[in-house]
Image (cartoon, rainbow, N blue to C red):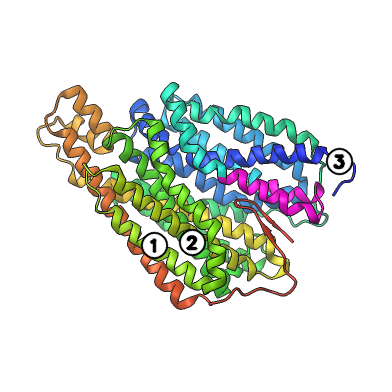
């Protein structure tokens, strides 16, 4: 801690909290705008998936190397650079006149977020001593957590009053405040920090990007399309090259070898599974609530709150359950609840009342929170002292990888079922193809052509596709529950001498 900072350290913490709030907002705020973007830019499910995944893929691929960049070149400099990059990406995306620029803007935002996320916590030791650091990390965790439910609400309100680009421009004043506050931060760097593995980061981005490309493009191009097959074929060699490079390097920056520990590896994969399910749901639900059920954007944001409320309630209350029943039982129970919620959700029909949706969303949030918090805690507790930072970065990376794959897989499954079930008989070929792109596009075609029954068919096809998708989520969660019950240890595997503080989306420091 720098004794010269005095009370200014709390102003600096406020700036860091604003930066962390922006990260939480950006995780959820765009999803509620997807139906409006689809209608305005005339894009289908495939482009909407890329708008979400461009952020997640870059975020996941760059986050661990970003921490090393901060250690080597200066944490304040890297944090300021990340905020500036996020600002540029937000403006670029908001002013985009087509899907290409918007997707590019989201990718730039993901790069900035990757630079910001690990550094918000990494700078805390220069601001606070051990006695105050727990309070500082709790404040950052609260800021990120608040951003998750605020995203749909703020985004919904903005969409009801302005155009869809406003959900990205809301970052501008917040990032400006964070940048001004960063002037109070002292510059710190790590002597002898390892060199940044640019090739390793490129392998992560290439492998994940190629896999996601094949999954997203498959329904529209065809699963046997040469580009789709080439993307999948490219992802495996890149992944093998990354693993080989990790084994050869001294002190591998990504720490993939930690996954061989069954406690850490098992719990890390559970985190990725929960990211897979939740990201897919948050991608699908706004389209159902707005396009099929006819709610406005702000009403959609309100109707998503049971999911996020369930996560927060479970996260706060699960520690007592863990002390009583052990982490294995709580994690398995959470995943079982997640599976039950998926079965509940799969029974939804076009005319179903919102009460049923609210119930299964609440159960989904409770299950996700009960599984994720003890799994993360057990994984961190199992890390050796000299791998706490690397391990926490790997945990978050895997969670974001799971989220990116969830949007790709579940979005593509929905798109495939929707295209197969939509009745376009009697429509001109061009109108029929446009209707198959998304339920929003089908509504637009029906409005312009007066095609009888197209709106009802599109709503039914989308709802059926969502039911199939939720059933798949249920099976995935059930499989995770069975594996957790069979393979995870009953007690936390604490390593002697390890005391870690973990922020919701930050780094870890002893």
- Which image quadrant is residue 77 in? top right
Question: Crowdedness of circle 2 by 10 Å Cα count: few (<14), some, many (20+)?
Answer: many
Seen in the picture, residue 368 relative to 452 is either above or below; the reply is below
| Mark number, residue 6 | 3
Seen in the picture, residue 273 relative to 98 is either above or below; the reply is below
Q: Give whichever of discs 2 and 1 has the lower sequence position.
A: 1
Which quadrant of the rendered structure holds the C terminus? bottom right
Q: Is residue 494 magenta?
A: no
Q: Which residues are magenta?
A: 119-145
Residue annotated with mark 1 = 337
Farthest residue toward the right? 4
Horizontal side of residue 202 vs 442, given as left or right = right
Q: Residue 400, percent across and down?
A: 52, 52
Do the numbered discs 2 and 1 sit on residues whose CB atoms are within 8 Å? yes
Q: Residue 285, percent across and down?
A: 35, 43
Do the numbered discs 1 and 3 sit on residues whose CB atoms are within 8 Å? no
Q: Main secondary structure of the magenta part?
A: helix
Residue annotated with mark 2 = 370
**Label 3 secondary element:** loop
Q: Nearer the viewer, residue 238 or 362?
A: 362
Q: Give whichever of discs 3 and 2 has the lower sequence position.
A: 3
């Amino acid at each position: 801690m720098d004794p010269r900072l005095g009370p200014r350290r709390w102003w600096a913490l406020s700036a860091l909290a604003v930066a962390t709030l922006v990260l939480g907002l950006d995780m959820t705020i765009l999803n509620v705008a997807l139906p409006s973007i689809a209608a305005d830019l005339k894009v289908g499910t495939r482009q909407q998936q890329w708008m979400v995944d461009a952020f997640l893929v870059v975020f996941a691929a760059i986050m661990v190397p970003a921490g090393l960049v901060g250690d080597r070149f200066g944490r304040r400099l890297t944090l300021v650079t990340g905020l500036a990059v996020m600002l540029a990406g937000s403006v670029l995306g908001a002013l985009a006149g087509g899907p290409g620029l918007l997707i590019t803007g989201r990718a730039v935002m993901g790069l900035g977020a990757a630079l910001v996320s690990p550094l918000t916590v990494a700078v805390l030791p220069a601001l606070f001593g051990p006695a105050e650091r727990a309070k500082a990390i709790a404040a950052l965790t609260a800021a990120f957590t608040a951003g998750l439910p605020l995203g749909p609400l703020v985004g919904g309100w903005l969409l009801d009053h302005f155009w869809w680009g406003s959900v990205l421009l809301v970052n501008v004043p917040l990032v400006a405040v964070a940048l001004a506050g960063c002037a109070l931060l002292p510059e710190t760097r790590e002597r002898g920090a390892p060199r940044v593995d640019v090739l390793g980061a490129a392998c992560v981005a290439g492998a994940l990007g190629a896999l996601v490309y094949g999954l997203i493009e498959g329904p529209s191009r065809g699963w046997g399309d040469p580009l789709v097959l080439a993307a999948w074929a490219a992802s495996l060699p890149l992944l093998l090259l990354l693993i080989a490079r990790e084994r050869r390097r001294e002190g591998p920056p990504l720490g993939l070898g930690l996954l061989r520990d069954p406690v850490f590896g098992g719990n890390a994969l559970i985190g990725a599974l929960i990211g897979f399910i939740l990201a897919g749901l948050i991608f699908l639900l706004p389209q159902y609530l707005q396009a099929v059920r006819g709610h406005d954007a702000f009403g959609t944001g309100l109707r998503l709150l049971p999911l996020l409320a369930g996560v927060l309630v479970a996260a706060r209350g699960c520690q007592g359950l863990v002390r009583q029943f052990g982490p294995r039982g709580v994690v398995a129970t959470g995943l079982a609840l997640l599976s039950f919620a998926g079965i509940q959700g799969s029974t939804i029909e076009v005319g179903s009342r919102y009460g049923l949706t609210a119930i299964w969303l609440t159960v989904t949030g409770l299950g996700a929170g009960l599984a994720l918090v003890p799994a993360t805690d057990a994984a961190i507790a199992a890390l050796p002292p000299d791998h706490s930072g690397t391990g926490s970065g790997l945990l978050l990376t895997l969670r974001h990888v799971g989220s990116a794959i969830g949007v790709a897989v579940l979005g593509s499954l929905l798109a495939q079922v929707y295209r197969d079930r939509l009745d376009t008989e009697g429509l001109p070929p061009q109108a029929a193809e446009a209707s198959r792109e998304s339920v929003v596009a089908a509504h637009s075609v029906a409005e312009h052509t007066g095609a009888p029954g197209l709106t009802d068919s599109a709503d039914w096809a989308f709802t059926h596709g969502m039911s199939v998708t939720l059933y798949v989520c249920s099976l995935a969660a059930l499989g995770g529950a069975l594996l957790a019950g069979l393979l995870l240890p009953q007690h936390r595997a604490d390593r002697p001498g390890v005391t870690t503080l973990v922020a919701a989306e930050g780094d870890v420091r002893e």
